[in-house]
Amino acid sequence: MKDTDDKLINRNMKPTAMRELVLDALLEQNVAVSLSDLEKKFDKADKVTLYRTLKTFEENKLIHSIDDGTGSVKYALCAENCQCNPHDLHVHFFCTECKHTYCLNDTPIPSVTLPLGFEIKTINMVVKGTCANCKK
Amino acid sequence: MKDTDDKLINRNMKPTAMRELVLDALLEQNVAVSLSDLEKKFDKADKVTLYRTLKTFEENKLIHSIDDGTGSVKYALCAENCQCNPHDLHVHFFCTECKHTYCLNDTPIPSVTLPLGFEIKTINMVVKGTCANCKK
DNA sequence: AATAACTTTGCAACTTGGTTGCATAAACTT
DNA sequence: AAGTTTATGCAACCAAGTTGCAAAGTTATT
C-alpha cells in the first residue's frame, strides 16, 4: 500500500486517484501551492474537483490554507500529527522575487499583547521579502 | 478652509468633493472600511471612483490597506506623519463577532527571527478573535 | 474670456478566484 | 445485483478588484 494512501486513511479520507495525485504534488513541493497552480499542473483535471479535494484535505487537517496576501489562497501540508491548534501556528514567508510562499515550520508566531478586552483566537502572520534562494 | 482639505493638501492631493466625503467617512470611523462599505454608505457614488479615491489616498500615504483575510481589503487612516515604513507597522485585529477590523496602533508587530538567508521587507499580522465591544 | 492641457469622475465591461447546483460515475453495503 | 453513499465533472454564478475610454470639471495660457 502506498505511502500516500496511509496518509489519507489516517486522516479519514478514502484514497481516490485524484486525492493521491494532489497529495503527491503537495509532497514534492517545498512551497505552498494555490488552486490555480494545481490547475496548471493537472490541466486535464477539473478545477472544481481540485478545489473540493483541497477542501476535504483541509477539513481533515492534512493541509492548512495560507492567506499570503496575493489574492489566491495557498495550501501546504500540515505536520504529521498537526491538529491545527494555535500552538501549531507558524510564520509564513512570501518571496517577492520568485513569488513563492514558504511555511516556516520552525518559526513560531511570537506572542502579542493586545489592548484590554481583546481576546485572541488565532493569528495570521506573513513576512514578505526575499527568500534564501533568491538572495544569492 | 476645512480640516480635511488640509490633510489632503498636506499629502499632495487636490481637495475634491469626493475626496472630502471619503476622508470624512474614514475620520468618523474607528474601524477599517472596505470599498463595499463605502459603496453602501454613498450609494449614489460610483464604485470605480471610490476605488480610485482609495488608491490615491493610499499612494499618498493618507491611508493604508489591510488584508484581514476576509477577502475584501480594508482601509484605515495612517498616523499623522506616517510614511508607512516598517517601523510604522502595527497589528490588525479582526473581530469574528462584529466582523470589524481594528488598527491596533499601539501594538507594534513583534520581531521574528527568520531562517538563514531570508530577508524581511514587510510584515502582515492579523489577530482574529473577539474585540473589547463584543466580549462583554 | 477663449482655448488648450490636464485631472477627476462615471459608465461599461472584463478578469480572476472562489463557489454552488445538479447530474453522472464510482465505490461501498447488504 | 439493487440500493445507498461518496466522488467527480460540467455549467453557471458571484464578489472583488481592475482597465479603457469618454465626459465633466479644473487649471493654466494667451
Image (cartoon, coloured by chain):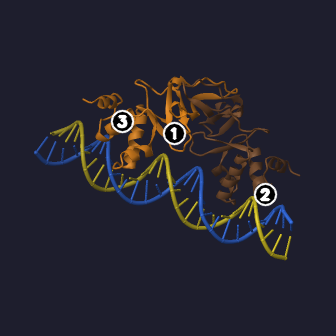
Chain colours: A brown, B orange, C blue, D yellow
The answer to which image quadrant residue B71 occupies is top right
- Residue under the image location 39 percent in, 38 percent down: B56
**Residues indicated by labels 3 and 2 sit on the same polypeptide chain:** no
Q: Nearer the viewer, residue B135 or A36?
A: B135
Examine the image and state in which quarter residue C11 appears.
bottom left
**Residue C14 appears left or right of A119:** left
Q: CA distance from mark 1 to mark 3?
A: 23 Å
Residue B1 image point, x, y percent? 24, 29
Q: Which residue is mark 2?
A: A17
Residue type marked 3: Leu
Q: Residues within 10 Å of mark 1 (few under 14, many from 20)?
A: few
Discs 3/2, front: 3
Judging from the image, mark 2 belongs to the subunit labelled: A
| Chain letter behind tag 1 | B
Residue type at tag 2: Ala
Which element is circle 1 on?
A: loop
Mark 1 vs mark 2, CA separation in Å? 42 Å
Query: Looking at the image, is mark 1 or mark 2 nearer the viewer?
Result: 1
| Amino acid on which disc 1 is placed | Cys
Residue placed furthest toward the right: A1
Instruction: Indicate which disc residue B23 carries.
Output: 3
Which residue is at the far front? B136
As helix, strand or loop, the secondary structure at mark 3 comes to helix
Q: Is residue B110 above or below residue B22?
A: above
